[in-house]
Amino acid sequence: MTTSALDVLAIGNAIVDVLSRAEEDFLSANGMAKGGMALIDEARAEDVYAAMGPGTEASGGSAANTAAGVASLGGRAGFIGKVRDDVLGTVFGHDIRAAGVAYGTPAAADGPATARCLILVTPDGERTMNTYLGAAQNLVAADIDAAMVESASVTYLEGYLWDPPAAKEAFLAAAKIAHGAGRKVALSLSDTFCVDRYRAEFKNLIVSGTVDLVFCNEGELKSLYETSDFDAALVALRKDAKEAVVTRSEKGASFVTREAVVSVPAHPVERVVDTTGAGDLFAAGFLTGTTRGLDPATSLRLGALAAGEIIGQMGARPQRPLIDLAREAGLIS
């Protein structure tokens, strides 16, 4: 394996997040399942946006957030994702490059508008997402920059991208290129919504070795194996996956292989403000650690630190350099 130009190349939906605070009765009145993610069309997006209170706009998207987190930790990150050449598309491109992430996917000249995710944050910090995928779902295999994939130690793919057929082909093309170059492929299961829709296909990606490293939370893991028994689901995952990272909120996180389980506690958090991006930033921390050659426990702690920082603020992009926090904690020299 040659030395990589990138530590992590993330591929996913290029989305602009619009965050607003809301009470739980607002969710009920608008038919939203608290804590979930619903795919909506452009008309629904306009209706929800009109009903929301004052909001803040920030570039988002699960894999893009992970890439930004890697860069904030001092890693070399890239991103591939599709936008339209419209106002939000310009905002997205500017923000991710400003975060230190390499990004050069050509914007679409026509077709659906740039994707946006309307996020309602309740007083307990829980986020409920309404996502209009727009241009993001038009990512195709031709958009995959083979040189970037070949140069990255890990190509990280988000489960949210598994919905559109053309994006699915892009996803598989990237995995093939990565493995051809002797690189690793990681997959985030993203949401129980995704797992419920594509359970068999996700399992096949894991069992077939298309994916080397799986990221999931406790809910996604239980959904994958259709059980309410966490321990039973973990046993099944260890049989199927080469490597996996399982997060359990305040219960901490584990790195599992067929041979062993390594667990760490959650990072202390004074106050949960907004859980948006917690899983994305955990993945950023773990991937930064593992591509630096750190041991699994330290990599997990780096993930927990990044996740703990992000849930103490509004939005899924770090507001201060995570590398400074990691150095203070003695996790990175």
Image: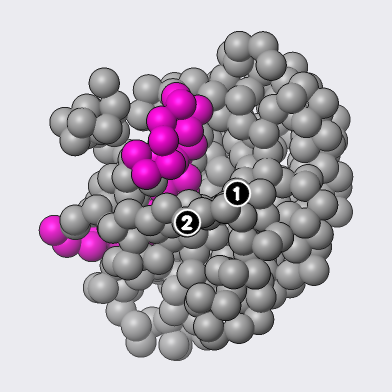
The answer to whether residue 273 is magenta is yes
For this view, does 307 lie left or right of residue 169? Answer: left
Asked where in the image residue 73 lies, by quadrant, the reply is top left
Q: What range is drawn magenta here?
A: 270-299
The answer to whether residue 158 is magenta is no
Q: Residue 6, how many percent across, how many down? A: 57, 20
The residue that disc 2 covers is 261
Q: Residue 271, how many percent across, how many down? A: 17, 61
Asked where in the image residue 201 lies, by quadrant, the reply is bottom right
- Figure label count: 2
User: Residue sitting at 50 percent across and 28 percent down?
Assistant: 291
For this view, does 19 lie left or right of residue 42? Answer: left
For this view, does 35 lie left or right of residue 166? Answer: left
The residue that disc 1 covers is 243
User: Residue sitting at 65 percent across and 81 percent down?
Assistant: 226
User: Residue sitting at 73 percent across and 55 percent down?
Assistant: 206
Report, in whole angstroms, how far the alpha carbon at label 1 lies from the one at label 2: 10 Å
Categorize mark 2 by other alpha carbons within 10 Å: few (<14), some (14-19), many (20+).
some
Q: Where 44 sits versus 103, above or below?
A: below
User: Label 2 sits on what residue type?
Assistant: Val
Q: Quadrant of the image for the C terminus?
A: top left
Q: Quadrant of the image for the N terminus?
A: top right
Q: Where 187 sits versus 287, above or below?
A: below
Which circle's residue, 1 or 2, is located before the other in the chain?
1
Please, what secondary structure does the residue beneath circle 2 have? strand
Q: Nearer the viewer, residue 262 or 218?
A: 262
User: Residue sitting at 67 percent across and 34 percent down?
Assistant: 184
